[in-house]
Amino acid sequence: MKKALLYFGFFIVIAIGFYFAMTKLIPGYGIVKLPVLSYVQPFEFYNQDGKRISNRDLEGKVYVSEFFFTTCKSICPIMNTNMLDLYTSYKDSTQFRILSHTCDPETDTVDRLKVYADSLGVDTDKWIFLTGRKDSLYNAARNSYLLDDPKNNLKSIEEQFMHTQFFALVDKAGRVRKVYDGLKKEELKELHQDVKKLIEEPVDQTRFVNNIFGN
């Protein structure tokens, strides 16, 4: 019995040693990878400084995407307070960005977004505020970031007003890896951890689309 326990303990030590060695030799070994939900489609919007920002500017960056509007008095201030915590944690990383798109481009002009960004006191090279055509913004939210049901696009764009509390996490290859409720502490904690995972994850260009709202 003692000999069997000795052998068992020996093999456990060997297994642990092998696992530790592999984590050092192979980046990402042993880490449970997040699934791929969708691929971000090409886009071009204007930031708070009036500069055009496209998907090409985010290549090689991990970023979190959200949709809000500056006159919101309900969930948006809470969402962006939570986003500010994430910004503070990763503002020194060269591989991380935040994209905050307006849901109300008629009101949220470039100048208005600039005032809003300044009120938060953030580095707008790291946390970028975007406006543009309403239909393009809503299509991005629904078809790229999966933050709202694409079926809502069936309505006239003039009749639509999107109000979503969700955040999308995008990897260095422009793939959405997870969607989080921006109001729930447990999901925000996961988001903080998952950002770190994706920053450390090697770039993978594999594309696999699985829309969480269905095809």
Image (tube, rainbow, N blue to C red):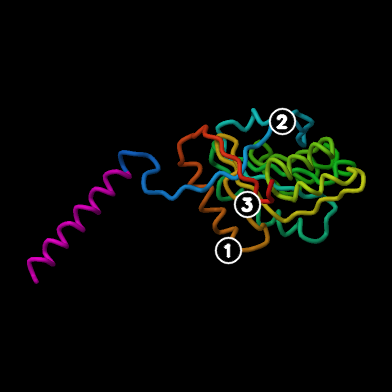
Say whether disc 1 or disc 3 marks the residue closer to the N-terminus: 3
Q: Residue at the location (60% across, 36% down)?
A: 174
Horizontal side of 69 relative to 30 (left or right) equals right
Within 10 Å of the Cα at label 2, are there few (<14), some (14-19), or many (20+) other Cα atoms? some
The foreground one among 93 and 132 is 132
Q: Residue at the location (58% across, 63% down)?
A: 186
Q: What residue type is labelled 2?
A: Ile
Res. 186 mark: 1
- Residue 153 place in picture, x, y as percent: 82, 44
Q: What element carries label 2?
A: strand
> What segment carries the magenta color?
1-23
Q: Is mark 1 on a helix, strand or loop?
A: helix
- Residue 184 place in picture, x, y as percent: 64, 63
Q: Distance between the Cα atoms at labels 1 and 3?
A: 13 Å
User: On screen, 141 above or below 80?
Assistant: above
Q: Distance between the Cα atoms at labels 2 and 3?
A: 22 Å
- Magenta stretch, overall SS: helix
Horizontal side of 133 relative to 15 (left or right) equals right
Q: What element carries label 3?
A: strand
Q: Residue furthest front?
A: 215
Res. 53 mark: 2
Q: Which of marks 1 and 3 is in front?
A: 3
Q: Residue furthest right?
A: 158
Res. 179 mark: 3
| Label 1 close to label 3 by CB (< 8 Å) | no
Q: Which amino acid does label 3 sit on?
A: Val
Q: In which quarter of the image is residue 2?
A: bottom left
Within 10 Å of the Cα at label 3, are there few (<14), some (14-19), or many (20+) other Cα atoms? many
Quarter of the rendering occupied by the C terminus: top right
User: On screen, 4 above or below 32?
Assistant: below
Q: Quadrant of residue 13?
A: bottom left
The foreground one among 63 and 3 is 3
